[in-house]
Amino acid sequence: MDNKEIVKNFEKKVHDDLYEFLKHKEAIDAHLPECPDVEEKFNAICRAYLPDGAREFQQYPVVSLGWMMFIGMAMAYYWDTDWETHSKRENYYEELRDKGGYDNLDDTVVKDILGYEGEAAEKISELVAECASRVDSMIRHEPVEAGTEAAFGCYVAALRQLYMMGMCMELNALGYHMTPFDPASMN
């Protein structure tokens, strides 16, 4: 199996695992929302994030992974509140990081941007930590050699899925629920 296929299969496993877990926790709906505006920002955000995220992964893998989920949540919030303004920005990750530093990116997103406090803030932080722990375990059990192109590809694929699920979680929290449309109800 070549590297692209390994990464593709790994990304599907991560997606499926997070989807089932978050659906069970009622953090997302069965039908995931699509938000191309936010989705298309991932590559630029990831490029900016990789120097920090990859460096932190060795000692703090759950943080390295989980922070990307928080970033996805922040991006969904930006999209909902004022995308016309936010879409023109270019340094999303750097701005989030620089508000309170890399180590406090979770608090920056949860408290300062999303406005969660107390128990609600704890619950969302615990959910993200659980998702990141699940993905870390999947990375560690994937039969790829550390430091290889395939391992790097799996890390980026994991970040992409965490970002997308963070986006979906926040859209859900903001009231975007994907429900079947019944044309008969229009009559």
Image (cartoon, helix red, strand yellow):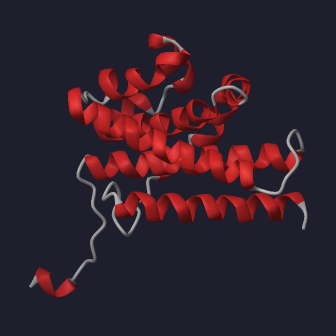
Task: Name the residue: 81% across, 61% down.
Answer: 6
Question: x and y percent of residue 35 in the render?
Answer: 44, 53
Q: Decide: is 116 above or below 167.
A: above
Task: Name the residue: 76% across, 56% down.
Answer: 142
Taking 3 as reference, is 81 left or right? left
Question: x and y percent of residue 8 in the render?
Answer: 73, 62
* Nearer to us in this view, 91 or 5: 5
What count of labels does the image hold? 0
* Nearer to us in this view, 147 or 178: 147
The C terminus, quarter of image: bottom left
Taking 11 as reference, is 131 left or right? left
Taking 144 as reference, is 33 left or right? left
Task: Name the residue: 37% across, 69% down.
Answer: 30
Question: x and y percent of residue 153 in the render?
Answer: 78, 48
Task: Name the residue: 45% across, 12% down.
Answer: 99
Q: Is residue 26 visible?
A: yes
Single out the residue that lies furthest toward the left.
187
Q: Decide: is 180 above or below 33.
A: below
* Nearer to us in this view, 25 or 179: 25
The N terminus, quarter of image: bottom right
* Nearer to us in this view, 66 or 170: 66
Q: Decide: is 17 above or below 134.
A: below
Q: Quadrant of residue 185?
A: bottom left
Question: x and y percent of residue 9 in the render?
Answer: 73, 65
Q: Is residue 40 visible?
A: no
